[in-house]
Amino acid sequence: MTDSPRILVQHLYLSPGHNFFGHHGQPAGGNPILAQTEIVCRAGRGIEGDRFFDFKDDYQGQITFFARETYDRLCAEFGVWDREPSVFRRNVITAGVELPTLYGREFEVQGVRFLGTGHCAPCHWMNAAFHPGAEAALKGHGGLRAKILTDGVLRASA
């Protein structure tokens, strides 16, 4: 494993069900996204209580990360101040790291190891969930999908 950058965890979220995944051509679902102070990561399985826990073998998106810096940029770009970062339905809101630098790399956060598997592509739902034009503005910055390599607990910063 190479040296991991210092990654701050600002927010953590779980969602027990899918709102957008598998809903193409249909209305969005109404499942909540729940703010958490901590989440339990299980190697090769996902996050306990999340919609992708035990989704399928070797799933590339067992956990997702989204940069606070991207959220702040979008808020400023669109003048949107009434949406939380949870609208993007990513599990971990980070600060202090360019997430694309973790594609294809092992990294560690709070003692839990991950493998960055690639970009978390934005979809057309982002235009409704955040603001029209959000999908295009997120190209290349939609977040990071990762596999969980070791069991552990992530905690949000106070």
Image (cartoon, grey):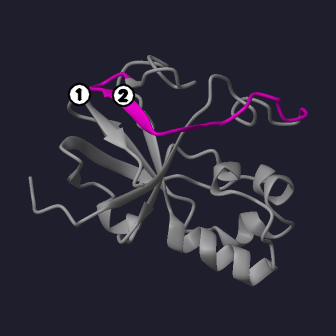
Local crowd size for mark 2, using a 10 Å CA cut-off: few (<14), some (14–19), many (≥20):
some
Residue placed most toward the observer, 55 or 157: 157
Q: Residue at x 71, y 52 (%)?
A: 123
Number of labels in the image equals: 2
Q: Is residue 79 above or below residue 111?
A: below
Crowdedness of circle 1 by 10 Å Cα count: few (<14), some, many (20+)? some
Q: Is residue 65 magenta?
A: no
| Disc nearer the start of the sequence (1/2) | 2
* Quarter of the figure with residue 152: top left
Q: Please indicate whether residue 95 sits to the left or right of residue 71 in the image.
A: left
Circle 2: element type: strand
* Residue lying furthest front: 158
Tag 1–tag 2 contact (CB < 8 Å): yes
Q: Which residue is mark 2?
A: 40
Q: Could you tell me which quadrant the C terminus lies in?
A: bottom left
Query: Which residue lies under the disc numbered 1?
Result: 151
Where is residue 6? Give x, y as percent: 24, 65
Q: Position of residue 5 (x, y in %)?
A: 22, 66
Determine whether 79 is above or below 140 in the image.
below
Residue at 76% in and 60% down: 83
- Looking at the rendering, the stretch of residues picked out in magenta corresponds to 26-45
Type of amino acid under label 2? Val
Q: Position of residue 40 (x, y in %)?
A: 36, 28
SS at mark 1 in the image: loop
As shown in the figure, which amino acid type bears the numbered disc 1? Asp
Res. 55 mark: none
Q: Is residue 102 left or right of residue 11?
A: left
Image spot of residue 92 (x, y percent)? 47, 48
Q: Residue at x 36, y 72 (%)?
A: 96
Is 110 on the left-hand or right-hand side of 139?
A: left
Q: Main secondary structure of the magenta part?
A: loop
- Tell me which residue sits at (34%, 29%) in the image: 41
